Image (spheres, helix red, strand yellow):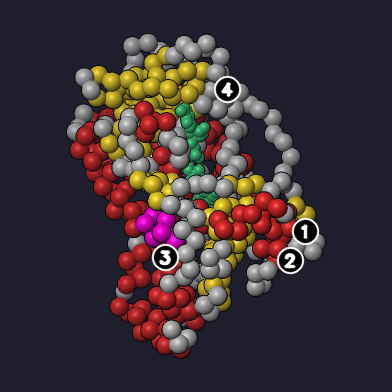
Amino acid sequence: MGSQAVVRLPVTRAKPGRPFDVAIVGASIAGCSAARLFAQAGARVALIERRPDIAAYKVACTHAILSSATPTIAALGLERPLEDVGAVRTHADFWTPCGGWIRAPADAPRGYGVTRRALDPILRQLSVDTPGVELFAGQTAVGLLSDDGRPAGVEVAGAHTNGRTHSIRARLVVGADGRESTTARLARVPGRVRPHGRFFYFAYWRGVQPRTNRIRAWLLDPDGVSQFPSEDGLTLLAVAVHHPRLPEFRSDLEGAYARRISSVPDAPDLSEAQRVSKLIGKLAMPNVMRPAAAGGIAFVGDAALATDPLFGSGCSWAFQSAEWLVDETAPALLGGGNLTAALGRYRRLFRRRLALHHFLIAEFSSGRRLLPAERALFRAASVDASVAAALEQVVSRRRSPLRLLDPRLAPSVVLAAARSGR
Ligand SMILES: Cc1cc2nc3c(=O)[nH]c(=O)nc-3n(C[C@H](O)[C@H](O)[C@H](O)COP(=O)(O)OP(=O)(O)OC[C@H]3O[C@@H](n4cnc5c(N)ncnc54)[C@H](O)[C@@H]3O)c2cc1C
């Protein structure tokens, strides 16, 4: 994947005495989406990012974007730029040991396959170009301001300011600063941590066969392998392995990665393929969820919920939570309404939409084996189009997991369980 020039933006200095409507900490997916949508609603937004390079991107991410996020991507005006950069419109197929392939219906809405190296700079530029957004690049949030106990802005420090800080005042502070959210730490809003039992390694390839616009994911009970098509003919091949196998990877990383990929049924054919990146690993990523609004501060994206990436939901939820926050709070923020009540509505909406998905993903991320009910469901989905369609709605996160309790699906699932003798 070659190197890219560092593009530094001039650091913006807040004009004294003119408070912002919103100060957002973190200019990645969630922060840039929230900044653009708030500004489009008429807000004046300070977007604070510790990295000075506008082309900076998140490396440790396999960047599958689910169809649950496509309405937000459209609302941001991001569809065309993604098309221009060659993003792949994806469906996801799953292989399980209980019945083989489960195919996404051809008419299901599609997600996106696009690298963070392409996505992050495009989204950041789109956000910065939105009238009303001011980017404070190379500035790290180090403190929170308060007036009479209410959040009133952010204290920031640049890399070369000898410890001097300056204040960015705003009516609403948003933490979009990722899994280890400094904003949450400063605001003393702890997250609930659920244990995580997997590690990930991945690399980019060219020339992988079959060439497809479908994500192919193998749920190997308990490991996982995924093939993600992206722009420019790139394919990302990832392995998700449970922790007891870490010594095998430590002693022979290249060999263990290659063996895990080549051992799956219908494995990607790498005979003519070339690896074009180093192997990228992520060994520790506890599942963390905190209230999406607390103490007058809102959290979006990973700052609110960082879940296991096996099912590739974090980027989509970063987009979506930004839109939910703006929808719920912009009228109160800009029209003089009750901001506390609006933040409460956002917190409840976030929880209603994502808590059950997260609970199930996090519980599965322990590295445990498939349960009998899951085996029956996968077996039924591999032979029954209506079960496959319902499952696709859930794993693309467009519908609640409760969708799978639809009694009309039960006969197929029960039959599949009976046929397999489980
Ligand atoms: C191995 C792995 C694979 C993944 N694969 C997928 C996948 O396939 N699909 C998917 O949807 N998700 C995936 N994810 C999850 C996804 O990467 C995250 O959910 C997503 O990046 C969250 O976006 P965000 O904007 O909330 O946070 P981030 O992308 O983490 O951005 C946080 C931003 O805040 C900035 N920041 C932090 N602290 C400060 C501070 N104090 N002051 C100023 N700025 C600050 C950071 O520099 C950064 O720009 C994966 C994650 C991992 C670890």
Graded by Cα atoms within 10 Å as few (under 14), some (14 to 19) or many (20 or more), the crowding at tag 3 reads many
Q: CA distance from mark 3 to mark 4?
A: 41 Å
Q: Are marks 2 and 4 in contact (CB under 8 Å)?
A: no
Does the CB distance between marks 1 and 4 fall below 8 Å?
no
Label whose residue precedes the other's in the sequence (3 or 2)? 2
- Name the amino acid, label 2: Asp
Location of residue 338 (image quadrant): top left
Whether residue 10 is visible: yes
Question: What kind of element bears circle 1?
Answer: loop
* Label ID, residue 16: none
Label 3: which residue? Answer: 393
Identify whether 308 is placed above or below 327: below
- Label 4 sits on what residue type? Leu
Q: Earlier in the sequence, mark 1 or mark 4?
A: 4
- Judging from the image, what secondary structure is the residue with disc 2 in? loop
Magenta: main secondary structure: helix
Amino acid type indicated by mark 1 = Ala
Q: Residue 30 in the image: state x and y as whole percent.
A: 44, 40
Tell me which amino acid carries mark 3. Answer: Gln
Along the horizontal axis of the image, is 82 left or right of 127?
right
Magenta residues, start to end? 357-364
Mark 2 — residue?
269
Element marked by disc 4: loop
Residue identified by numbered label 1: 273
